[in-house]
Amino acid sequence: MKYIFSASILAILLTGCNSTPNQTSPVESTSSAPAETQVINFVGPMDLTIQLKSSDNFETATMTDNADRVFHLKAAVSGSGLRLANDDGVSIHFKNGEGIVEFVKDKPISITEYKK
């Protein structure tokens, strides 16, 4: 009987030690201010100009060329640098001001960043 009582008390104590009071984490407030839009400009051969705009740190972006074509891209896997692509084979990949754009899959065009 003594062992059953001791085991019961020990079980109650261990259960009490393992429980934690319910804590609610503070709710993150969302800012109502619009996100800052980042813009990067590129130039390429034959007077090609490209403007890349993003409001979410390049998780998604809109790429516009000088023929007023607009491409909606999202972040893609890259060994280094930043690569954005869409399901139609359009992509841009750049690092340190140099990059490659593909309007047609496997037809790369070299581009260089420029500051306005």
Image (cartoon, rainbow, N blue to C red):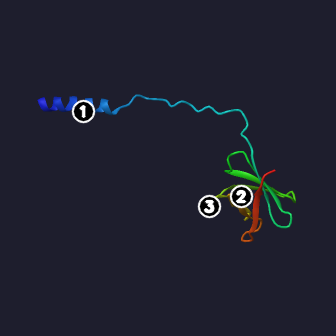
Direction left: furthest residue: 2
Query: Which residue, given by chain and number where applicable, does mark 1 sit on?
Result: 11
Q: Residues within 10 Å of mark 1 (few under 14, many from 20)?
A: few
Where is residue 95? Give x, y as percent. Answer: 67, 59
Where is residue 71? Give x, y as percent. Answer: 78, 57
The answer, for residue 86, to whether it is visible in the render is: no
Q: Real-space Cα distance between discs 1 and 2? A: 65 Å
Query: Which residue, given by chain and number where applicable, does mark 3 sit on?
Result: 78
The image shows residue 3, relative to residue 98, as above or below, that is above
The answer to which image quadrant residue 70 occupies is: bottom right
Residue closest to the eye, 72 or 1: 72
Q: Residues within 10 Å of mark 3 (few under 14, many from 20)?
A: few
The image shows residue 7, relative to residue 110, as above or below, that is above
Horizontal arrangement in the rendering, residue 41 relative to residue 94 (left or right)? right
Amino acid bearing label 3: Ser
Amino acid bearing label 2: Gly
Residue closest to the eye, 110 or 64: 110
Query: Which residue, given by chain and number where applicable, does mark 2 sit on?
Result: 97
The residue shown at (73%, 37%) is 34
Where is residue 55? Give x, y as percent. Answer: 72, 45
Label 2's element?
loop
Q: Residues within 10 Å of mark 2 (few under 14, many from 20)?
A: some
Amino acid bearing label 1: Ala
